[in-house]
C-alpha cells in the first residue's frame, strides 16, 4: 500500500478466485488504456453471471495500479489447476488477434512468473491458442 492509500483510508482487498480471474482479465484487456463495451460483456461471461465477483474485480481495477492488481490476483490463486486455467484464459484474451507482444506479453510474463506456472505448460497453451486462432488456413488459395 502506498503512502497516499494510507492517507485516503485505502483498505486491503481479498479477492475470491472468480473475482481474481475477472481482475486478471481486466488487466490484460485494459493494459492498452481502455476497456470497450464489448470487452465488458466478455468479462461478465468469464465470471459466469456472478455479479459480485465482477463488481469486486472492476472496483479493484479502477482503484489500483496494474502491478498491485497483479499481486492481488496472484495471492488469490491457490490451486495449480486454477493457475493453469487462469493463465489459459488470459493468454486466450491476449492472443485473440493472433499476436502476443508489447505490454500484453510483459504482463503475461509477470503473471506466469508470480504464479510459477511451468514453462512447458505455457508453451503448450500458447501453441494450442495460436492454432485455434490461425484462420489463415481457411483463406482461398
Image (cartoon, grey):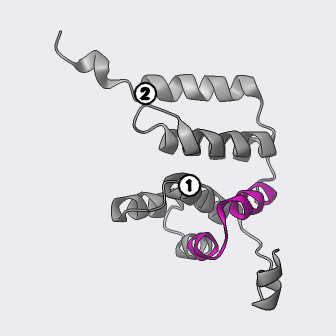
Residue drawn at x 31%, y 24% is 135
Q: Residue furthest top?
A: 141
Is disc 1 surrounded by few (<14), some (14 to 19) or many (20+) residues within 10 Å?
many
Using the rendered image of the protein, determine whether residue 66 is visible from the camera's viewpoint.
Answer: yes
Residue 70 is a magenta residue? yes
Q: Is residue 57 magenta?
A: no
Q: Quadrant of residue 3?
A: bottom right
Query: What residue is rendered at 78% in x and 40% in y?
Result: 113
Quarter holding residue 97: top left
- Residue 91 horizontal/vertical position (percent): 56, 39
Which residue is painted at 30% across and 20% down in the image?
Answer: 136
Secondary structure under the numbered disc 1 in the rendered image: helix
Name the quadrant of the C terminus.
top left
Q: Residue 11, relative to residue 27: is it above or below? A: below
To which quarter of the image does residue 2 belong?
Answer: bottom right
The residue identified by callout 1 is 25
Task: Please provide the residue range marked out in magenta.
Answer: 58-75
Q: Is residue 16 left or right of residue 34?
A: right
Query: CA gap, disc 1 to disc 2?
Result: 19 Å
Badge 1 or badge 2: first in the primary sequence = 1
- Contact (CB < 8 A) between labels 1 and 2? no
Q: Is residue 89 visible?
A: no
Q: On screen, 94 above or below 60?
A: above
Mark 2 crowdedness (10 Å alpha carbons): few <14, some 14-19, many ≥20 = few
Examine the residues drawn in magenta and state their main secondary structure: helix
Left or right side of 132 for 122: right
| Residue occupied by mark 2 | 132
Amino acid at each position: 500500500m502506498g503512502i497516499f492509500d494510507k492517507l485516503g483510508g485505502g483498505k486491503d482487498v481479498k479477492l475470491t478466485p472468480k473475482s481474481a480471474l475477472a481482475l486478471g482479465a481486466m488487466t490484460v484487456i485494459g493494459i492498452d488504456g481502455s476497456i470497450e463495451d464489448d470487452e465488458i460483456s466478455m468479462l461478465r461471461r468469464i465470471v459466469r453471471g456472478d455479479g459480485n465477483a465482477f463488481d469486486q474485480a472492476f472496483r479493484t481495477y479502477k482503484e489500483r495500479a496494474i502491478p498491485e492488481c497483479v499481486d492481488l490476483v496472484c495471492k488469490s490463486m491457490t490451486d495449480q489447476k486454477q493457475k493453469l486455467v487462469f493463465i489459459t484464459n488470459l493468454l486466450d484474451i491476449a492472443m485473440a488477434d493472433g499476436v502476443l507482444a508489447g505490454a500484453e506479453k510483459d504482463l503475461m510474463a509477470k503473471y506466469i512468473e508470480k504464479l510459477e506456472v511451468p514453462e512447458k505448460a505455457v508453451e503448450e497453451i500458447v501453441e494450442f491458442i495460436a492454432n485455434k486462432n490461425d484462420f489463415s488456413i481457411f483463406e482461398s488459395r
